[in-house]
Image (cartoon, rainbow, N blue to C red):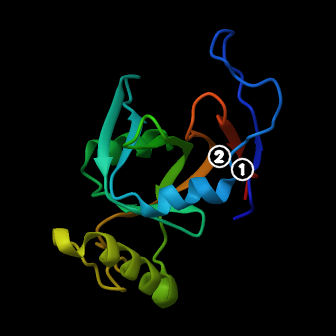
Amino acid sequence: MTHPTSDRPWLPDGYGLPATDDGLLDWSAVEERLVASHHYWLATTRPDGRPHVVPRWGVWLDGRFWYDGAPTTIHVRNLNGDNHCALHLEDGSEAVIVEGRSDVAPPPGPELGQRLSAAFTEKYADRGYSPAADAWDGQDSGGLRVLTPIKAMAWFNFPSDVTRFRFAAD
């Protein structure tokens, strides 16, 4: 995944947004929070246009968000119709919001499977989740999904550092 471009988003007058790009966040600082977080909020759209938001466990690895989702869950059924979604960390003061596409991940294979297993285990073993490296290799693999970012917005000290990130298409 390539490093995203960054700039100031448009905000209505009155928010105090700086007039220059001085003080923009560096993507590496934002990505650190995505890696470290244990809880994420995933927003999808139901077929009738109503929103649906669900908390998710997952790992940020190789510039993408990897998580499990059984095909019968509402959010996965929503994504089967429209794979666009938004991911938000729990903190609203130091916010990280990622917009992207969530797709069924292909079987990760031994190398990526091991890295995913290690990342999930490090975060969630104390909560009873420690998948094996081959957990996602079979057809009934538990529904590994991957969210590929398109755009993100973050701030750690609003409005002085509010930053928009745009990702190049693969």
Contact flag, marks 2 and 1 (Cβ < 8 Å): yes
Element on which disc 1 rests: loop
Element on which disc 2 rests: strand
Q: Quadrant of the N terminus?
A: bottom right
Compute the Cα span from label 2 to label 1.
5 Å
Amino acid found under the numbered disc labelled 1: Phe
Quadrant assignment, res 154: top right
The 10 Å Cα crowd at callout 1, few under 14, some 14 to 19, many 20 or more, is some
Which residue is painted at 43% across and 62% down in the image?
A: 36
- Residue 137 visible to the viewer: no
Q: Nearer the viewer, residue 9 or 168?
A: 9
Q: Residue furthest bottom?
A: 110
Horizontal side of 147 relative to 80 (left or right) equals right
Against 60, is 11 above or below? above
The label number, if any, that marks residue 78 in the structure image? none
Horizontal side of 16 relative to 31 (left or right) equals right
Q: Nearer the viewer, residue 169 or 47?
A: 169
Against 102, is 154 above or below? above
Find disc 1 in the rendering and name its residue: 167
The label number, if any, that marks residue 150 in the structure image? 2
Amino acid found under the numbered disc labelled 2: Ile
